[in-house]
Image (spheres, grey):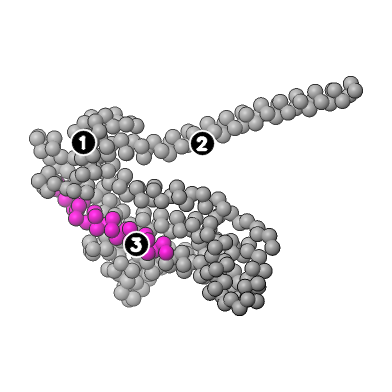
């Protein structure tokens, strides 16, 4: 009995020590992630505070988490500009008339580009995941090598010439066609599809289903998590992209994007105001803050609805027969 009591006391003490260590570990982890969240969110909150602050008061600075004087004037000037107020801007090529056009093009590009790219990557991944496809090993090896190697400036120049040859330059489709397939996304979807048991496909084939039917009715419903995760990545790329606009549609305002318009504004726009006019005009920092927030809104709204798919979508999980 004495030995059993001694063992039980040792076990209890050991569990108490482990519990104390676990508490310290969790406290450290939670503290780290709270600090990380603060460091990550503070610039966004600060920019939001400036964008909602009255423009003259914002010149004084020292705005951190909340505006001192609440005002929606910066957003009003971004969406519904008063030409009488904006007429003194040297670089009016911040070009409000292009800003709304950029929002429309970026929205269309994100919607069409995400749907077409997701479909293209999914179809190609399905083909490569089939065991009876003859060239799957060679193509997979070729694309993996291409994924980790880059040719530098020469392929970029060649690509530019190729796009011009196919009349993709100076058009909306230069945003869509070149981005239909990404090797990284194909490999991610293919790996997820390979975790699906072959018995599903075999049972469907016995019922007379073809590959298109199998892909649409069996494989795709199972792959919804990975589809959602990849769709978020594709949508983020299309919404935030500006370099292809600068390269191919720089001289075509009808195909401009919101990110390119923001880039032009932040790099070129200068404000020259004085006296009373200055008091009636939005300041550069508040206008920039409003522009940043407007550009962030779409993905900020969409992301939480797809967040739950990220872990299951990018993690290989087995499915029992």
Q: Residue at x 23, y 36 (%)?
A: 71
Helix, strand or loop status at disc 3? helix
Q: Give the position of the N terminus as an image quadrant.
A: top right
Would residue 37 be visible to someone looking at this image? yes
State which tag comes first along the sequence, 3 or 2.
2
Measure the C-alpha gap from mark 3 to mark 1: 33 Å
Q: Residue at x 65, y 58 (%)?
A: 318
Is 255 magenta? The answer is no
- Which image quadrant for residue 117? bottom left
Horizontal placement of 153 versus 269: left or right?
right
Density class for disc 2 (Cα within 10 Å; few <14, some 14-19, many ≥20) is: few
Give residue 109's mark: 3
State which tag comes first along the sequence, 3 or 1.
1
Q: Residue at x 41, y 38 (%)?
A: 41
Give residue 129's mark: none
Is 101 magenta? The answer is yes
Give residue 55's mark: 1
| Magenta range | 88-115
């Amino acid at each position: 009995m004495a030995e059993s009591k001694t063992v039980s006391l040792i076990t209890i003490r050991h569990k108490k020590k482990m519990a104390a260590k676990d508490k310290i570990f969790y406290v450290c982890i939670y503290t780290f992630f709270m600090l990380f969240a603060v460091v990550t969110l503070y610039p966004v909150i600060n920019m939001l505070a400036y964008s909602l602050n009255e423009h003259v008061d914002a010149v004084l600075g020292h705005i951190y988490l909340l505006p001192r004087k609440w005002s929606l004037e910066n957003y009003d000037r971004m969406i519904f500009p008063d030409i009488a107020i904006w007429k003194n801007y040297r670089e009016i090529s911040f070009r409000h008339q292009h800003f709304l056009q950029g929002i429309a093009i970026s929205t269309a590009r994100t919607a069409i580009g995400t749907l077409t790219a997701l479909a293209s990557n999914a179809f190609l991944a399905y083909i490569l995941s089939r065991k009876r496809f003859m060239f799957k090993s060679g193509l997979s090896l070729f694309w993996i090598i291409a994924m980790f190697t880059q040719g530098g400036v020469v392929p970029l120049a060649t690509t530019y010439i190729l796009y011009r040859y196919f009349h993709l330059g100076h058009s909306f489709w230069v945003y869509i066609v070149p981005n239909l397939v990404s090797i990284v996304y194909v490999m991610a979807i293919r790996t997820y599809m390979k975790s699906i048991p072959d018995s599903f496909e075999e049972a469907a084939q016995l019922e007379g289903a073809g590959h298109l039917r199998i892909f649409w009715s069996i494989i795709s419903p199972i792959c919804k998590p990975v589809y959602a995760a990849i769709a978020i990545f594709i949508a983020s790329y299309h919404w935030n992209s500006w370099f292809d606009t600068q390269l191919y549609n720089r001289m075509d305002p009808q195909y401009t994007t919101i990110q390119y318009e923001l880039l032009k504004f932040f790099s070129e726009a200068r404000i020259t105001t004085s006296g009373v006019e200055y008091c009636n005009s939005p300041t550069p920092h508040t206008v920039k803050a409003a522009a940043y927030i407007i550009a962030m809104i779409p993905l900020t709204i969409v992301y939480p609805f797809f967040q739950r798919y990220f872990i299951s979508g990018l993690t290989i999980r087995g499915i029992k027969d």
